[in-house]
Amino acid sequence: MPEQAVSRLERRKAGTRSALIRAAQTLIAAGRTNAPILEITQAADVGMGSFYNHFENREQLHRAALDAALEAQGALLDELTAGLEDPAHVFAQSFRLTGRLHRRQPALSKVLLHYGFALTTSDDGLAPRARRDIEAAVRDGRFTVRDPELALVTVAGAALSLGWLLHDQPERDDAATTDLVTEDVLRMLGLGAAEAHEICTRPLPDLDTTVGRLGAV
């Protein structure tokens, strides 16, 4: 087969897979985790046969949808914390940005919140980055926690609860609420109140511009 034809075929296959993943994410965000495969393919505007060219079942598609959401979140956080040297600042900035993303990317947020604490064992997304930053801050003497794994569980609980609160109370100021929670988390990890407050008042990258450039999930 000519190279151009192969390239078009691969692009078409990738487009079909992406459409199925986006459709699954939309349905998961709406709480429709049991939507029939036919409904998923209709939402993706692809044929039923195309589904089975990419996935064996709905559960496999849901895993791919979650992995894509985690990868998008992780890539965004990596970009928006690049260049920061203090691991406590990296951790705080990631937490503050994650809180703000619940309103700016509600579909991605709801996909991640749907899976809840299962994400703490994932190799992608916020959890491994939070673990990395907590452990780095402990090594540098910035955090004083006895068990980083337990600290991660506590941090995950705060992050997930914050996300649900911001969805349940749309009138609440997401930035102010997130920064207050981040301060409390930093104090729990060992920073003094004054330093935790100072870190949470530092300017953040232009999140709206970055999210717009990367595209919504």
Image (cartoon, grey):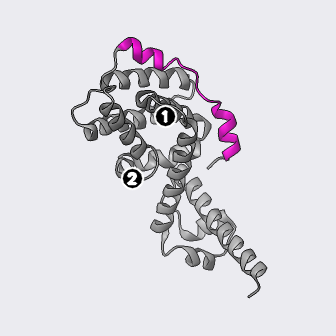
- The span from disc 1 to disc 2 (Cα, nearest Å) is 17 Å
Q: Residue at x 78, y 78 (%)?
A: 4
Density class for disc 2 (Cα within 10 Å; few <14, some 14-19, many ≥20) is: few
Please state the total of marks drawn on the protein image: 2
Whether residue 75 is visible here, answered yes or no, is yes
Residue 89, by quadrant, is top left
In the rendered image, the residue lying farthest to the bottom is 1
Predominant secondary structure, magenta span: helix
On-image quarter of the N terminus: bottom right
> Does label 1 or label 2 sit earlier along the sequence?
1
- Mark 1 touches mark 2? (CB < 8 Å): no
Q: Which residues are magenta?
A: 193-215
Q: Is residue 88 above or below residue 48?
A: above
Identify the amino acid type marked 2. Answer: Ser
Does residue 193 appear left or right of residue 92 in this picture?
A: left
* Label 1, residues with CA under 10 Å away: few <14, some 14-19, many ≥20: many
- Dot 1 corresponds to which residue? 94
Q: Is residue 34 visible?
A: no
Residue 73 is situated, as x and y percent measured from the top left of the image, at 53, 45
Q: Secondary structure at mark 1?
A: helix
Q: Position of residue 111 (x, y in %)?
A: 51, 49
Tell me: residue 197, above or below residue 144.
Answer: above
Measuring 65% from the left and 30% from the top, which residue is drawn there? 206
Q: Quadrant of residue 148?
A: top left
- Residue at label 2? 122
Residue 40 relative to residue 5: left or right: left
In the rendered structure, which amino acid carries the disc numbered 1? Ser
Give the x, y percent position of residue 110. 51, 45
